[in-house]
Amino acid sequence: MHSISEYQGLISAYIGEQQFRRTPYNLYEPIAYIISLGGKRMRPLLTLMAAEVFDTDCTKALPAALAVEVFHNFSLVHDDIMDDAPLRRGHETVHEKWNTNTAILSGDAMLILAYQYFEQYEPAVFRDLAKLFSRTAIEVCEGQQLDVDFETRENVTIPEYLKMIECKTAVLVAAALQMGAIIAETTPENCRLIYEFGLNLGLAFQLQDDYLDAFGDPETFGKQVGGDIIENKKTYLYLKAIEFSNPEESQQLMHLYSIHPADNADKIESVKIIFENSGASAATRDAIRDYTLNAFDTLEQMHISDDKKAMLRAFGENLMGRNV
C-alpha cells in the first residue's frame, strides 16, 4: 500500500499530464486554474486507495480518480457562483477572476470532461462507473438544493438535515471509494461495504466540520470560526440546540439567527454559549463518534486482510482527528 503523500503525488503527476489548457482558452483556462489550486484531494485519493485495498494497481484507478476530482471542482465553481463567494482556497473564485458566464460554461465543460475519463475503461467497468457517477451527481445537486431551501425554512428537522449533508458531501466520498472497488472488480458485497464505510465517514466528517466551525481552533481549522453562525446556517448544532433548549433560550437563539450585526463577535459568543448549555455541542460530538464507529464496523465485514482493514481505519482516524 502507498502512503497518503504518495497517492497525492500520483494524482498531482497525472493531473500534470492532462491537456487542460487548450482552445478556446476562455473555456479551458478557468478549468486549468481551479484544478491547479489543489487542496487535499481527499476524494481522488480514496479512489486510488480503494483499488489498492482490493489488490489492484492503484494507477489503473487514476482516470476515475481524476473524474471525481474534476466533478468535485465543477461543483465548487457553481457553488461559488450561488454563494457569491470571492475566494476559494485563498485565491479568487472563477467567477470573480473571469465572470459569471465564463464560470457557468467552464463548469458545464468540467462535468462533461469528468464523464470522459471513464471512457478509458472496458465496457463493463465503464457501465458500472457511469451508473454510480450519474446517481451520485444528481444526489449532489439534490443536496445543494436542499441546502438552499433550508436557508429560508424555519422548520428543518434533524433527519432532513442529515439527508442534505449525505447528498451534498457524503455520497461523493462513498462513490470515490466504490469506484476504486469497481475498477478492482471485487465482489458486490465488498463494493457495498466500502460505499457504506465512505458514507458514514463522510457524514461524520461533515458533522465535525459543523462542530469545528463553532468550536475549532482558528489557527488549525483553516476557515473563519463562526462562519455558519454569521450566515445563520441551520446546522446540526443549531437544530439540536432548538430541540434541547428551554423556550427562553430557544427564542433567544432564533432571534440571534435572524440578525446580521456589523460586529459578529457577541453574536457568535452568545450562540456558542447556548450550544454548550443546551447540550447541543455534546450531542454533536456523540453523533460524530457514532458515525465514525459505524464506518469502522463495516470494515470488519469486508473480505480483505487485517492489515488493509487497519490501513482504512487509520485513514479514518486521521481524517477525524482534526484539531478542535
Image (cartoon, rainbow, N blue to C red):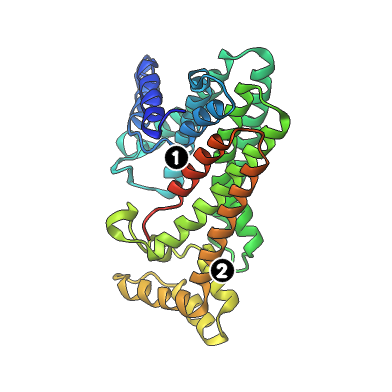
In this view, 56 is above or below 105 = above
Asked which secondary structure carries label 2, the reply is: helix
* Residue 145 visible in the current orientation: no
Give residue 235's position: percent from left, percent from top. Answer: 52, 62
Please identify the quadrant where the C terminus is shown. bottom left
Residue placed furthest toward the right: 188
Give residue 17's position: percent from left, percent from top. Answer: 37, 15
Foreground: disc 1 or disc 2: 2
Give the residue type that dot 1 points to: Leu
Tell me: 319 left or right of 174: left
* Residue 57 visible in the current orientation: yes
Graded by Cα atoms within 10 Å as few (under 14), some (14 to 19) or many (20 or more), the crowding at tag 2 reads some
Tell me: 208 left or right of 118: left
Which badge, 1 or 2, comes first in the chain's sequence?
1
Asked which secondary structure carries label 1, the reply is: helix
Residue 239 image label: 2
Give the residue type that dot 2 points to: Leu
Mark 1 highlights which residue?
76
Give residue 148's position: percent from left, percent from top. Answer: 54, 53
Give residue 220's position: percent from left, percent from top. Answer: 30, 54
**Who is closer to the viewer here, 263 or 14?**
14
